[in-house]
Image (cartoon, helix red, strand yellow):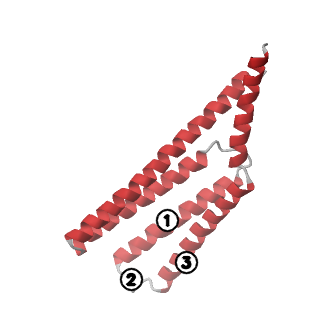
Amino acid sequence: MSEQNRAAQRAVPEQLERALAAEVSLRSRLRHVAVGLAGGCGAAVIAVLWATEPDALPKRTQAAFAGLIAIGLAWAVLAGWVLSRRRPLFARDRVLSARIALAATVVTAVAGVALAAVRGSTVDLVATAAGGAVFAAAAMLALVRARRRRRELLRLRDALRQDAP
């Protein structure tokens, strides 16, 4: 085997090692702890607020509280799942978090547009729809980037497995 081939084989593991080191780093794990705490605490605070005045709240407010609690719990569950894994996820956590962000953004935007259509002016409706579209596009871009990153990491992993003796 030539020296160039051996160097090329070493390059793939080094690339993969660097990419995966970032995934399992202390900084990455602390970010997931923060996301889990924020989601769980947010859901808990809203649940406590809802529990203290269950009959006094209109149905649409109760529906909004239920949605916000679901979103907070989704982030907490995702963080718990990521933190419970003891091996690299090859950016699967990024894809899942981007999906949660996209779903939450779309649901919030649709609810906001519906509310603006029923209770607001045309200016309110246009502003709400435009804001929802911008945030949904940003969430979609995050999902596209996360999927691309996952594909890159999986390609590197597969290349390493093929080159392994």
How far apart are labels 2 and 3 at the CA level? 16 Å
**Who's the residue at 35% across and 80% down the image?**
58
Q: Nearer the viewer, residue 107 or 26?
A: 26
Q: Nearer the viewer, residue 4 or 70?
A: 4
Question: What amino acid type is highlighted by mark number 1?
Answer: Ala
Report which residue position mark 3 lands on: 45
* Type of amino acid at the residue the image marks with label 3: Val
**Quick check: marks 2 and 1 in contact, CB under 8 Å?**
no
Q: Quadrant of the N terminus?
A: top right
Sequence-first tag of 2 and 3: 3
| Image spot of residue 63 (x, y percent) | 39, 71
Residue occupied by mark 1:
70
Q: Residues within 10 Å of mark 2 (few under 14, many from 20)?
A: few
Identify which residue is drawn at 50% across, 86% down. 52
Q: Residues within 10 Å of mark 3 (few under 14, many from 20)?
A: few
N-terminal-most mark, 2 or 1: 2
Q: In the depicted view, which residue is nearer to us: 58 or 40?
A: 40
Q: Is residue 156 above or below residue 40?
A: above
Q: CA distance from mark 2 to mark 1?
A: 18 Å
Where residue 26 sits, quadrant-wise, is bottom right
The residue tagged 2 is 57
Say which amino acid is labelled 2.
Answer: Leu
Looking at the image, residue 79 sits to the left or right of residue 136; the answer is right
First in sequence: mark 3 or mark 1? 3
Q: In the picture shown, does residue 34 fall above or below 56?
A: above
Element under disc 3: helix
**Camera-side mark, 2 or 3:** 3
- Disc 2 is placed on an element classified as loop
Query: Along the horizontal axis of the image, is 49 left or right of 19?
Result: left
Query: Residue 149 at x, y = what percent?
Result: 57, 41
Query: Could you say where residue 33 lies in the image, as x and y percent from the top left?
Result: 67, 63
